[in-house]
Amino acid sequence: ETGVTQTPRHLVMGMTNKKSLKCEQHLGHNAMYWYKQSAKKPLELMFVYSLEERVENNSVPSRFSPECPNSSHLFLHLHTLQPEDSALYLCASSQGLRQNNEQFFGPGTRLTVL
Amino acid sequence: AQKITQTQPGMFVQEKEAVTLDCTYDTSDPSYGLFWYKQPSSGEMIFLIYQGSYDQQNATEGRYSLNFQKARKSANLVISASQLGDSAMYFCAMSTTGGYQKVTFGIGTKLQVIP
């Protein structure tokens, strides 16, 4: 595997389900991000982890719970979601947090909440 | 607050022609970075090019160049010799630092290359 991988690629869940999104980066980076991409809206930064510590929680509802067990893996745990949470969830990584560090993105998980 | 504006929801370009995608930004930070990403229908965001606010020269990466006009706060992407594979969504983004790299994205421009 190379780059940033995300599983599953597609997920359909009911509002009462609990599921998790997984992200893995194979680039040796030390920062990881979760973004939400909804139709007709800019990407929204949700969470930032640097060296496995959360450095930003961008006013995200508690029904989204991130977990970063090591610098290569990032999870997004989902529970009691709402239909408006349906979106493409993108994971990214970067080497450091400097402004010139480009972020490398995974292919995303297309989430549909029924 | 940071803001990125992309005013072209969709653009068409003939294959082998050049195209310019517009991006303006707003920030009060003196130091920032500007990125362009490409998102094909597969969903993955692909990094194209970076311009630092203090860089004296416009960035170029192969067929991509960034027309950086600091006084006008614009960072337009120029794609030369368009190819069919260039059809995708293009996002302009700005990064600033304040404990972590905060990246603000624009709403994107959908580019379609016509044979």
Image (cartoon, coloured by chain):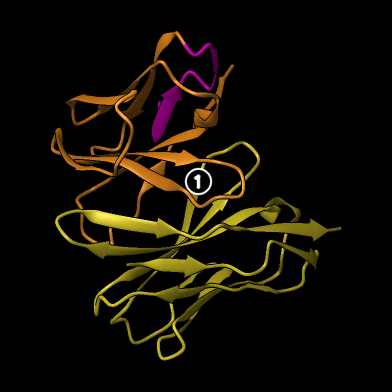
Q: Is residue A111 above or below residue A35?
A: above
Where, by quadrant of the figure, is residue A36 drawn?
Answer: top left
Q: Which residue is mark 1?
A: B45
Q: Which residue is depicted at the point 78% across and 59% down? A: B113
Residue B103 is left or right of residue B44, and the answer is left
Q: Is residue B72 above or below residue B17?
A: below
| Residue A45 lies within the magenta run | no
Q: Which residue is depicted at the point 27% across and 26% down? A: A66
Residue A19 is left or right of residue A86, and the answer is left
**How far across and down, in percent of the image, does residue B45 sit?**
50, 46
Q: Colour of chain B?
A: yellow
Classify the position of the C terminus of chain A by image quarter: top right
Question: Which stretch is magenta?
Answer: A1-15
Of the pair B28 and A27, the residue shown nearer to us: B28
Q: Is residue A75 above or below residue B108?
A: above
The amino acid type found where label 1 is placed reads: Met
Q: Colour of chain A?
A: orange
Q: Is residue B32 above or below residue A18?
A: below
Packing grade of label 1 (10 A; few <14, some 14-19, many >=20) is many
